Image (tube, grey):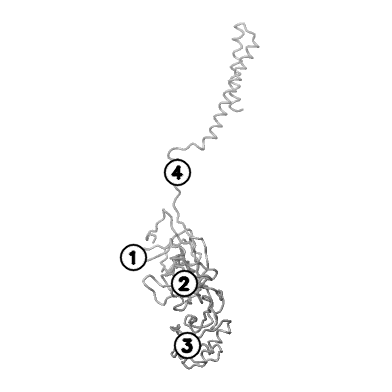
Amino acid sequence: MNVAGLFLRGRLDEAGEGTGTGAATGEEPASALTRNRRRALASVAAAVLLATLALTVGVLVGPTVRSPAQAVADAAPPAASPVTALAERRVLTEPLITRGTVRPGASVEVTAPAGLTGDTAVVTRVTLRPGAKVREGAVLAEISGAPLFGLVLPFPLYRDLGEGARGPDVTAVQTALRRLGTGAQVTGVYDESTAGAVNALYRQRGYTPPSDLRRTAVVALDRAGRTVSAVRARVGAVLREPDAVLLALDTAAVTVQATVARKLSVGTRAEILDETQGARLPAVVRDVADRPGAEGYAVTLAFTDGALTPGADRTVLVTVQPVRDSEPVLAVPVAAVYSRADAVTFVTVEGEGRRLSDVVVETGRSAGGWVQVTPKGGELDAGTRVVVGDSAFKSEQGEAS
């Protein structure tokens, strides 16, 4: 029998003893006994309910009740343990980042002959287009309806040439006309043969020949076969300025000029970023100075796909991709390398049972947060766990370098 049953039996016994009292007072014995039993049962039920509630509260609340000392212990941080990383064999490469300036390519400019300027020097025709090859004897343009010939000469003509003229300029013109197949004789004297060759030059190109060869009709070219990069002259333009540019020939590609701290190899790949437009274009190192200047080695980079338009002091961000080493090296994160007061560098490794030991190393190149290490005793290889430290961990032999 449980505790509640014993308690209930006791209450019933007490109720039974009370029957005599009921008889003495004149009450019916049966009804008095019934009332006493009901009161006993109510008291027992209340007691059982209170006991049950107390037990339930104890079960639910008991585990969460902590003493002040236990609360302080629970709030303390866990015991510190070193943070580790794996040593690796990897190729250490670090891109080189610098700024550069966009430069226009060099070109050969064809200017109007001396004396061919003024209000009457009007461009009436342009015969060449970008991409065309300039042949010797070709008509480059028409100025006020007269042809402008391109001849390969060692110097520009400095005078008009007519019958009886002598000199190196006559010889140069005769040599050019002979190359064109006009039958001119190279005598150094402007004679009938030379005049006939000049007439043939004009007539073959559809123009009426003049009585002599005017210096304003010939542009001196350094060589034939150059390519027209740009046509500066426009129909209707008036050549008012001396040495007005008519054509640009063999314009070199736009380049980026920069200075770097170390010497690069020709052919090294790079990327050009125009921050104002967000354009990224591939490039390659085309030329490198033999010796460094005050700020480093001067390099020229050429675009390999597209190009930027040169502008006044237009600067760009240059990222040069280094040539990768052929072999990977043993490397650890930079944070894993420590040094002692005697300048000896070491790496703390984690062995079996999480036992820590220091391995003296010699460091080499670094890149991307990793550094090359060569162990000088002790076990350290790819896959070894090395301590990179945490806020609580300190080596007993030194501080993190």
* Amino acid carrying mark 3 in the image: Gly
Q: Nearer the viewer, residue 339 or 364?
A: 364
Q: What is the spatial separation of the Cα atoms under label 4 and label 2, in whole angstroms?
A: 95 Å
Residue extending farthest to the top is: 26
Residue designated by label 4: 75
Q: Nearer the viewer, mark 4 or mark 2?
A: 2
Q: What is the spatial separation of the Cα atoms under label 4 and label 1, in whole angstroms?
A: 40 Å
User: Which quadrant of the rendered structure holds the C terminus?
Assistant: bottom left
Q: Quadrant of residue 2?
A: top right
Instruction: Say whether disc 3 or disc 2 marks the residue closer to the N-terminus.
Output: 2
* Amino acid carrying mark 2 in the image: Asp
Label 3 element class: loop
Q: Nearer the viewer, residue 87 or 168?
A: 168
Q: Nearer the viewer, mark 3 or mark 4?
A: 3
Instruction: Say whether disc 3 or disc 4 marks the residue closer to the N-terminus.
Output: 4
Mark 1 Cα within 10 Å, few/some/many (few <14, many 20+)?
Answer: few
In percent of the image, x 45 and y 87: which residue is there? Answer: 169
Q: Nearer the viewer, mark 1 or mark 2?
A: 2
Residue designated by label 1: 342
Q: Which mark is residue 119?
A: 2
Q: Which mark is residue 162?
A: 3
Q: Is residue 211 left or right of residue 337?
A: right
Count of all numbered marks drawn on residues in the image: 4
Q: What is the spatial separation of the Cα atoms under label 3 and label 4, in whole angstroms?
A: 110 Å
Q: Nearer the viewer, residue 137 or 45?
A: 137
